[in-house]
Image (spheres, helix red, strand yellow):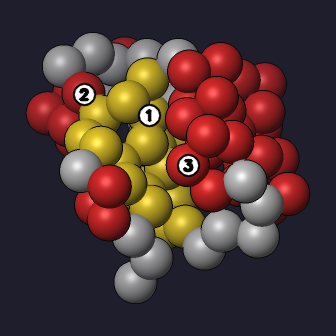
Amino acid sequence: MANITLYELPGCPFCAKVTSKLDELGLAYDTINVPSSHAERTEVEEVSGQTGVPVIVDEEHGVSGMAESSDIVQYLEETYA
């Protein structure tokens, strides 16, 4: 099990931006695909307080429920690059 978990929706361009950065940095991560309906995204809402994706959790660095693809990419670059 990886330390990073990514909540994403297949086909989401913002999620793709994050997965590209994770792959570029060679980071192992687990993916949880969320339902397309925001009303059914209870798991990601519990983690982040909102239903949008992408959201990451990085247990190793105490990050739980970080949203917004640009913020996530910046965090990954600053932490792992």
Q: How crowded is mark 2: few (under 14 residues within 10 Å), some or many (20 or more)?
A: some
Q: Where does residue 71 sit, x and y in percent of width and height? A: 56, 21
Circle 1: residue type? Val
Q: Is mark 3 on a helix, strand or loop?
A: helix
Q: Where does residue 69 sit, x and y in percent of width and height? A: 62, 23
Label 3–label 2 contact, CB within 8 A: no
Q: Is 51 in front, or is 40?
A: 51
The quadrant holding residue 49 is: top left
Horizontally, residue 76 falls left or right of residue 45, namely: right
Which residue shows up at 45% across the image and 76% down it? 2
Specify the quadrant that holds the C terminus: bottom right
For marks 3 and 1, the one nearer the N-term is 1
Circle 2: residue type? Ser
Label 2–label 1 contact, CB within 8 A: yes
Which residue shows up at 30% across the image and 43% down it? 63
Label 3–label 1 contact, CB within 8 A: no
Q: Is 21 in front, or is 11?
A: 21
Q: Mark 1 points at which residue?
A: 55
Q: Name the residue under label 3.
A: 79
Q: Is 48 in front, or is 3?
A: 3
Which residue shows up at 52% across the image and 59% down it? 31
Horizontally, residue 42 falls left or right of residue 68, namely: left
Specify the quadrant that holds the N terminus: bottom left
Number of numbered discs overlaid on the protein picture: 3
Q: Name the residue under label 2.
A: 48
